[in-house]
Amino acid sequence: MKIICIGRNYVEHIHELNNEVPDEPVIFLKPDTALLRENAPFFIPEFTQDVHYEVELVVKIKKMGKFIPVQFAHTYYDDISLGIDFTARDLQSKLKAKGLPWEKSKGFDHSAVIGKFLPKTDFDLTNLNFRLEKNGEVVQKGNSQQMINSIDQIISHVSEYFTLKVGDYIYTGTPSGVGPVSSGDKLVGFIETEEMFRFNIG
């Protein structure tokens, strides 16, 4: 099982981090040890002073695929979830400034929160609202219409480079509003009105 993440897939988020709009999906990976399931608490690692939340729609691959045409990509997943791509922003900035890979800032233990999965047929994936609340306040909200690359386009593109296998997760990018977490914070994520996860920052 692998965790495939897409960066810079919402224009407003690109602007808030002063990045350029990419010509194609930006891909990075997290190891399976990054997963944080079942509303377990997240503990801020000692190597960072600036961990940011990034809420994202997530799909789970149901069958093996390679070089998947866009028009068939929808047949490779049945379920959708909401997750958080935790990022050690201070460490990421240092690594990027040196031109180094930034996996350490993205793929550390428990940096990939995953909520419950629901059938995609419960939703309109072309107009899907989601949001993240921190301590009862909405800090991020997005809609699938805002994606530069749709879920099916992402699956097709990723499969050119990586064979997709059953159980792989794809995190599809975050909208604007990313920000830091502190010990004692409570994060709650929703797709439409459905609560997908609720956990504390330790």
Image (cartoon, grey):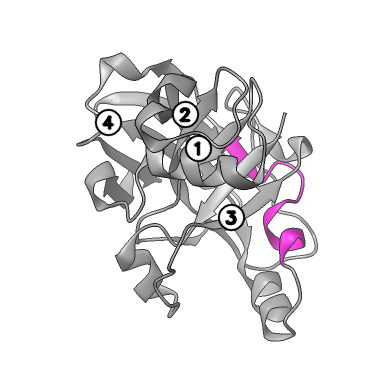
The answer for how far apart the CA atoms under marks 4 and 1 are is: 16 Å
The residue lying toward the viewer, choosing from 190 and 153, is 153
The residue lying toward the viewer, choosing from 165 and 66, is 66
Image quarter where the N terminus lies is: top right
Q: Are marks 4 and 3 in contact (CB under 8 Å)?
A: no
Asked if 2 appears above or below 80 in the picture, the reply is below
Q: Are marks 1 and 2 in contact (CB under 8 Å)?
A: yes
Q: Are marks 3 and 1 in contact (CB under 8 Å)?
A: no
Residue at the spot of label 4: 125
Residue at the spot of label 1: 83
The residue stretch that appears in magenta: 102-113
The answer for how far apart the CA atoms under marks 4 and 3 are is: 21 Å
Q: Secondary structure at mark 4?
A: loop
- Point out the tag, 4 or 3, that comes first from the N-terminus: 3
Asked if 91 appears above or below 54 in the picture, the reply is below
The residue under label 4 is which amino acid type? Leu
Examine the image and state in which quarter residue 129 appears: top left
Q: Is residue 35 visible?
A: yes
Q: Which mark is residue 197?
A: 2
In the rendered image, residue 135, in percent from the top left (x then y), is placed at: 40, 45
Image quarter where the C terminus lies is: top right
Measuring 45% from the left and 28% from the top, which residue is drawn there?
81
The residue under label 3 is which amino acid type? Ile
The answer for how far apart the CA atoms under marks 2 and 3 are is: 25 Å
Residue at the spot of label 3: 27
- Point out the tag, 1 or 2, that comes first from the N-terminus: 1
In the rendered image, residue 185, in percent from the top left (x then y), is placed at: 51, 47
Direction bottom: furthest residue: 97
